[in-house]
Structures are given as structure tokens and as C-alpha cells.
């Protein structure tokens, strides 16, 4: 009896030891946003005490398994993926608080740009095309922030993470998979998810690495070879038989690029879960909740089978405690030294001064983030790839920056295709110089029926503790208000107006916090308005009266801007205050039988104050409320005649349509305007924007019998503008279908469509 009891005890002891030694590996496939289902599966496993001792993944599987190896819980992962920060990482946009408005170039209608290197002896067509759909600057920073401390903690050995980890990338030069077992954790994860044409390839040890799914989208072989666990749990989120949608270019590329992979866990070795996720594309991260639920429910439906295969259990509380203990050993993220590669000495000194303006012995990740986006704001630096190496003796990191300075000519092309007369083509050339000072030189050309213009501009930035900039701009432009179309609405009013401006501007500017700047400037220009004071059935260029203005403009202006788009913004705010003193001469000329007859020139001096704001408030996931206010106050006298006075009055033009349509009822030397813009998000990048504006003029002009302008001070001529637009934001432009109504003239309804950007740039009075 005693012997039988001893044998039973020994058997139970051996069983416990066997079960406690049972090792479980988790393999996660690639599949883009579908991989969020992996997180749901992880949640189900943890709730049921299923241990995970090793992880391996490709593409999105590398992201999820990498985060798990860093000690992230499924809840932590979902919080990250659903955060606004993650969205900016994926689409390459800069967070509003880090938009360095001081260094940004003025917005243009650019929809496509490329750099033509001056160092290439032969122009290669492939180098002209963009190398990725998504701007990499956010990803470059994000993976430093996300992984640097964990790389330091594991001492570059992925076996020493919270759980051992492997990721697979694609070595396109050697046409084979590349397995990450050590090195920089950020590189290991990022290379595995760098899908061609969507994200930029990453160079590691002189290897050009792309998405690991190209050669091995389910690294079960890596799991077996490196860890040989007792049980392998697999999660597959791709359907090899799914055909790409006819209009989904990314899905078509995915089908063409990814090689066939083995999606099977070896028989008797474990369990593989395959999730049906048809209709989910590579970048559908906005479907995170439903994808998580699919993974969770699929795992729970198979939990009995998993438990029979995996008999060992871990307590969820113990797992949470181990995560806390692991993360408590992370080194503090601070930097002491900077190593800058890829630059000459002058460029290196400039970058260093921008990053280390505090003069303190150490600087933080936040300090670097501000400087990083500051350096990239003005396109003089094409790319900065940061890494961090931990030095335990200083308890600080050395920041390694691989910098690519832009030594190229930048060619930009833009357009606006419209159902109205607002069709426009834009061409731009830019050249940057980075040495002791940062310099930018641009030449822009606008060609269209409304605007024809040429602008040349040069800007010099200092890298002082308080940065400064000096700019000079020359512009020559012709602005036509719908030649041959009706502009004024009474029969005795002009039907055609042309404005010409030739001016030079000098500006001195300083930053005001991250998103603002202060400017002081002096401009000189010659302005000419051509118009008719009476309505005629036919006209020629000699039929127009001319008003000429020879003006100097001294200005001071504060501007704050972190709006998230240059057209149809949905987030951020803008505030501006401006004061101008203008002085010069007014000259009037009228046509006669032999040419133009001139009146004596008149002095023209006045001051003008302008202020405004635009802000967008997120009410919930679907609804956004925009608010707008604008005011102009000046003491300009009435000009030579009624038409001249109205044409030179500041206009309220809050919509795209109003910027190219002349409407005298929305022009005044003193006015207040208010607006609300309710916006409804239908799906990512598609929204309905409604706009309601009230225009409250204090000073209006009335026409006398002899065509003179009679100022009238009253609030009674209140007008409104209402517009509704369906807007789709493309990565390179916006597409909008709109309908609007103006209170003046009665029945003024307009319907149209725009594709591109309708931006006219600055004018003399701006």
C-alpha cells in the first residue's frame, strides 16, 4: 500500500513538472489592419490563463508580437492603436501641437512634388517618383519613442524581452527573408511592416528591408527553429483565396507582391486559428473594435481545444505583476550626447544648435521631438532617422541621427479642376541651402482663368537661441473676376474687373511658441484695377477705366496656426492680429478716343486693423463644430469713384467659391463676420461640411448720380452665406461637391465640384 502511494505521488510530481515545463509559442501572420484580430485572440488567451512563452510575427503580426514582448497587455495595445497618435504615425501627419508654423512655407496648391538631385550625373526616372505613399517622418520618430528603452533593457538581445521575440523582414536585394533576433527593436518591428510603396523601406546593415510578408507571412518555421516550443498557437488573418477589389490599388499590390507562404501549424504540434476578415483592407485601422471582437470571439470558440492542448496555466494577476516588474527596470529616457551622420560640419553645427538650445547637460525625449519637427518643417532636411544607444555609466542615451540633407531642386505640380471658372495649374521650383544659416529659395507660377501669377521668394533662418527669419518676395499677378461673366447684379454696374499687382515684400519674423510667429514687414507695390462703371453689351480692353495705386505698406502681424489641412480643415485652430499703415498715391485714368485721360494724382494714407480666428472642436467621434470670426477696421477715404472704392474694400471670402466670385455686398472697410461650420464624419477622410456665415458691415458705399462713392455707416445691410459640401480628402488633394446660397443677390444659388487645391497665395494687402 505504501509503495503504491509513493508511486502515485511520484507520478503526480512528474506530471506537475512536465506541465510546468510545457512551453507555448505564438505565431502571428501579416495582414495589415486585419491583424488587430490578433489582439482579440491574445485577450481571450490571457483571460483563460493560457501561457505565452515565445512570440514571432510578420508585418502587423510583428507589431502585435513585438508589443507583447515589450510587456504591453492587449488593453494597452488597443489603447495605442485607437489613439490619435497612432493615426498620425500611420498617415505621416504631424500632431497639431508640433506644427512649427514659423518655419513652414506658405501653403500652395501642390498635389505632387519630387526632388531632382543635383548630385546625379544622369537623371534617373525612378528617382523622380515618390518612394512611399506615407510620409516617413512620423514613423522615424515613433519607433524611437516606442522601443528605445526596451532595446536598452534587453541589451539588443530579443531573448531578454518580457517574452523572447522574433520578427521577419524581406531582404529585397538578396530576395529572401531576414530574421531579427537582436539589434534595434524599432528596426525589427518597423522593417517587418514596411509594405512597398505605402511605407518607405528601411536600411539595416546595408540591407534594404521591406515588409516580411513578401517572403514569409507566417513565420512558424522561425518559431520552430529558434525556440522549438511544445505547443504552437497560430493566428492567421489573411485569406489566400480572397481576390482584391477592382478599385483597391493597395490590395492589388498586396496580391502581386506577397509570395505564397505556408500558413499551417505542423500537425500535432499545435492549433491554428484562421479568421474570416473579408472586406478589410490594409489600412482599415478605424475598424479596430470590430476586428478585435472577431479575434476574441474566434479564440473563445476554440478555447476548449486550446485548453486540451495547453494544460499549463498562468494566473492573470501574476502576469500583470510580472509586466509591472519588467517595465520598472526600464531606463529613464533622456539624452546626453548627439551623433549626427550624413552631413558636413556646417550642416551638423546648424542641426546641433537647433536641437540643443537649452544648454543643459541632459535633454528629454520631448525636447528632441520639438527640435525634430522644427528641423523637418521647412524641407531643407529630407529625412532624419533617429536611434538611441544606452550608456549605463551616464544612465543616459546617446542620440544617433542619420540625416539626409536636401541638396535637390524640388519640383512641385498642382492643380484645381472645377466645374466653374476656377480651373488652375500650379508649378513650383524650390532649392534649399543648409550651412550656418538655413536658406530657402522658391519660384512659383499660377496659371488659370482667375489667377495668373509669378512669385519669387527667398528666406533665411538663423539657428540662434531665439530663431529669426528674413524674407524677400517679388510677385507679379493678374486676378480676373470671371471674365465675360456677370459679377454685379444691377444693369448699371460693371460686368468685368481685372486686378494687377506688382510688389516686393520684406519680412522679419520670430517664433511665438511652436505654432505661432510674429512678423514685421515693409512692402512696396503698384496696383492697377481695370473696370467698367456702366454696363455695356460689348467691350474691349480700351473700354475700361483704370485706377492705379502706388503704395508703401508697413505691417506688424501675429499669426497662430495649427490647422490640420490647408483646405477644408477639421481640427486645430488659427488666430491672427494685424496692423498696417499704408501710404502713397491714387491715380485715375479713363479711356477716350486717343488713349487714356488722367486726373491729378491724390494722396492716399490710411491704417488698417484686422483680426480673426478659426477653430474646430470635436464633439464626439462623428461630429465636429467649427467656429469662425473675422473683423477689419480701416480709415480709408472714398476713392475716385464708386466702383474703385468697392473693388479696393476688404472682402469677406470664407469659402472656396467666394474667393473667386466678386460680390459687392460682402465688401466693407469696417465689418464683423461670424460663422459656424458643423461637420459630420461619414468615414475616414469622407465628411459633410456645412457652413453658415453672417456678414455685418458698418461702412458701405452708395453710388451717386455722378458715380461717386458715398459712405454710409449702418449695420442694416447684413448678409449671409450658406454652403454644404461633401468632401473626400485624398492623400494628395481634396475632392468636393458643393451647393451654396448668398443672400445677395436674391436667388443666388451655385452648385459645383472641385478636385485639387484652390489656393491663390498672398497678395499685396496680406
Image: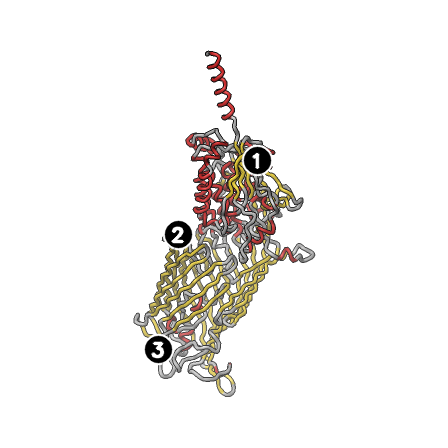
The residue singled out by tag 2 in the image is 621
Q: Which residue lies furthest to the right in this view?
A: 121
- The secondary structure type at the circle numbered 2 is loop
- The secondary structure type at the circle numbered 3 is strand
CA separation, marks 1 and 3?
90 Å
Coordinates of residue 624 in the picture (x, y in percent): 38, 56
Q: Which quadrant of the figure contains the C terminus?
A: bottom left
**Circle 3 Cα neighbour tier, 10 Å, few/some/many (<14 / 14–19 / ≥20):** some
Seen at 45% across and 69% down, the residue is 752
Dot 1 or dot 3: first in sequence order is: 1
Residues tagged 2 and 3 counted as in contact (Cβ below 8 A): no
CA separation, marks 2 and 3?
48 Å
The residue singled out by tag 1 in the image is 267
Coordinates of residue 637 in the picture (x, y in percent): 38, 73
Count how many numbered circles sit on residues in the image. 3
Q: Is residue 117 left or right of residue 362?
A: right
Q: Nearer the viewer, mark 2 or mark 3?
A: 2
The residue singled out by tag 3 in the image is 702
Amino acid at each position: 500500500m505504501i509503495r503504491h502511494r509513493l508511486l502515485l505521488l511520484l507520478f503526480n510530481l512528474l506530471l506537475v513538472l512536465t506541465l510546468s515545463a510545457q512551453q507555448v509559442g505564438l505565431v502571428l501572420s501579416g495582414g495589415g489592419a486585419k491583424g488587430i484580430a490578433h489582439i482579440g485572440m491574445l485577450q481571450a488567451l490571457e483571460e483563460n490563463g493560457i501561457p505565452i512563452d515565445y512570440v514571432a510575427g510578420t508585418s502587423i503580426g510583428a507589431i502585435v508580437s513585438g508589443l507583447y514582448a515589450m510587456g504591453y497587455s492587449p488593453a494597452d495595445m488597443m489603447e495605442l492603436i485607437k489613439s490619435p497618435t497612432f493615426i498620425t504615425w500611420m498617415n505621416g501627419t504631424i500632431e497639431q501641437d508640433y506644427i512649427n508654423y514659423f518655419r513652414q512655407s506658405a501653403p500652395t496648391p501642390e498635389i505632387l512634388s519630387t526632388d531632382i538631385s543635383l548630385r546625379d550625373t544622369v537623371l534617373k526616372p525612378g528617382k523622380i517618383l515618390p518612394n512611399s505613399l506615407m510620409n516617413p517622418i512620423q514613423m522615424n520618430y515613433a519607433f524611437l519613442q516606442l522601443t528605445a528603452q526596451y532595446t536598452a533593457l534587453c541589451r539588443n538581445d530579443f531573448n531578454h524581452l518580457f517574452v523572447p521575440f522574433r520578427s521577419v523582414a524581406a531582404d529585397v536585394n538578396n530576395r529572401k527573408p531576414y530574421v531579427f533576433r537582436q539589434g534595434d527593436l524599432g528596426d525589427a518591428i518597423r522593417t517587418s511592416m514596411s509594405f512597398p510603396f505605402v511605407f518607405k523601406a528601411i536600411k539595416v546593415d546595408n540591407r534594404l528591408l521591406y515588409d516580411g510578408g513578401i517572403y514569409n507571412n507566417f513565420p512558424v518555421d522561425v518559431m520552430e527553429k529558434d525556440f522549438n516550443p511544445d505547443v504552437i498557437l497560430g493566428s492567421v488573418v489573411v485569406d489566400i483565396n480572397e481576390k482584391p477589389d477592382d478599385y483597391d490599388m493597395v490590395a492589388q499590390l498586396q496580391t502581386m507582391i506577397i509570395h505564397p507562404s505556408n500558413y499551417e501549424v505542423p500537425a500535432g504540434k499545435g492549433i491554428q486559428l484562421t479568421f474570416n476578415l473579408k472586406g478589410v483592407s490594409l489600412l482599415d485601422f478605424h475598424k479596430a473594435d470590430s476586428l478585435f471582437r472577431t479575434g476574441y470571439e474566434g479564440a473563445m470558440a476554440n478555447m476548449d481545444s486550446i485548453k486540451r492542448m495547453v494544460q499549463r496555466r498562468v494566473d492573470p494577476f501574476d502576469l500583470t505583476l510580472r509586466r509591472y516588474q519588467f517595465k520598472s527596470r526600464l531606463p529613464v529616457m533622456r539624452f546626453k550626447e548627439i551623433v549626427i551622420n550624413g552631413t558636413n560640419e556646417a550642416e551638423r553645427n546648424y542641426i546641433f544648435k537647433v536641437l540643443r538650445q537649452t544648454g543643459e547637460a541632459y535633454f528629454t525625449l520631448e525636447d528632441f521631438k520639438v527640435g525634430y519637427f522644427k528641423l523637418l518643417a521647412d524641407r531643407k532636411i529630407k529625412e532624419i532617422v533617429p536611434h538611441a544607444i544606452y550608456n549605463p555609466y551616464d544612465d543616459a542615451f546617446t542620440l544617433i541621427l542619420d540625416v539626409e540633407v536636401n541638396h535637390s531642386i524640388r519640383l512641385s505640380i498642382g492643380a484645381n479642376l472645377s466645374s466653374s471658372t476656377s480651373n488652375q495649374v500650379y508649378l513650383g521650383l524650390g532649392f534649399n541651402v543648409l550651412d550656418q544659416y538655413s536658406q530657402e529659395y522658391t519660384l512659383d507660377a499660377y496659371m488659370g482663368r482667375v489667377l495668373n501669377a509669378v512669385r519669387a521668394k527667398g528666406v533665411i533662418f538663423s539657428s540662434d537661441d531665439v530663431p529669426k527669419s528674413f524674407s524677400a518676395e517679388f510677385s507679379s499677378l493678374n486676378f480676373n473676376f470671371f471674365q465675360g461673366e456677370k459679377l454685379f447684379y444691377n444693369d448699371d454696374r460693371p460686368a468685368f474687373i481685372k486686378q494687377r499687382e506688382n510688389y516686393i515684400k520684406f519680412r522679419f519674423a520670430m517664433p511665438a511658441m511652436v505654432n505661432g510667429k510674429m512678423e514685421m514687414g515693409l512692402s512696396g507695390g503698384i496696383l492697377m484695377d481695370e473696370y467698367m462703371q456702366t454696363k455695356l453689351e460689348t467691350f474691349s480692353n480700351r473700354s475700361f477705366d483704370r485706377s492705379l495705386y502706388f503704395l508703401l505698406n508697413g505691417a506688424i502681424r501675429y499669426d497662430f496656426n495649427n490647422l490640420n489641412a490647408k483646405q477644408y480643415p477639421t481640427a486645430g485652430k488659427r488666430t491672427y492680429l494685424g496692423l498696417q499703415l499704408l501710404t502713397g498715391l491714387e491715380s485715375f485714368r479713363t479711356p477716350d478716343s486717343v488713349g487714356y485721360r488722367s486726373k491729378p494724382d491724390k494722396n492716399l494714407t490710411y491704417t488698417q486693423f484686422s483680426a480673426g480666428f478659426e477653430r474646430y472642436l470635436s464633439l464626439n467621434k462623428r461630429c465636429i463644430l467649427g467656429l469662425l470670426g473675422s473683423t477689419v477696421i480701416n480709415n480709408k477715404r472714398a476713392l475716385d469713384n464708386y466702383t474703385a472704392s468697392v473693388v479696393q474694400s476688404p472682402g469677406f471670402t470664407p469659402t472656396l467659391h467666394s474667393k473667386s466670385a466678386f460680390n459687392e455686398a460682402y465688401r466693407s472697410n469696417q465689418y464683423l463676420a461670424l460663422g459656424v461650420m458643423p461637420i459630420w464624419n461619414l468615414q475616414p477622410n469622407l465628411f459633410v461640411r456645412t457652413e453658415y456665415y453672417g456678414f455685418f458691415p458698418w461702412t458701405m458705399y452708395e453710388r451717386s448720380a455722378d458715380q461717386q462713392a458715398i459712405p454710409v455707416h449702418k449695420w442694416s445691410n447684413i448678409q449671409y452665406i450658406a454652403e454644404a459640401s461633401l468632401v473626400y480628402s485624398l492623400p494628395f488633394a481634396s475632392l468636393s461637391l458643393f451647393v451654396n446660397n448668398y443672400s445677395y443677390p436674391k436667388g443666388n444659388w451655385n452648385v459645383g465640384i472641385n478636385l485639387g487645391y484652390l489656393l491663390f497665395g498672398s497678395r499685396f494687402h496680406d
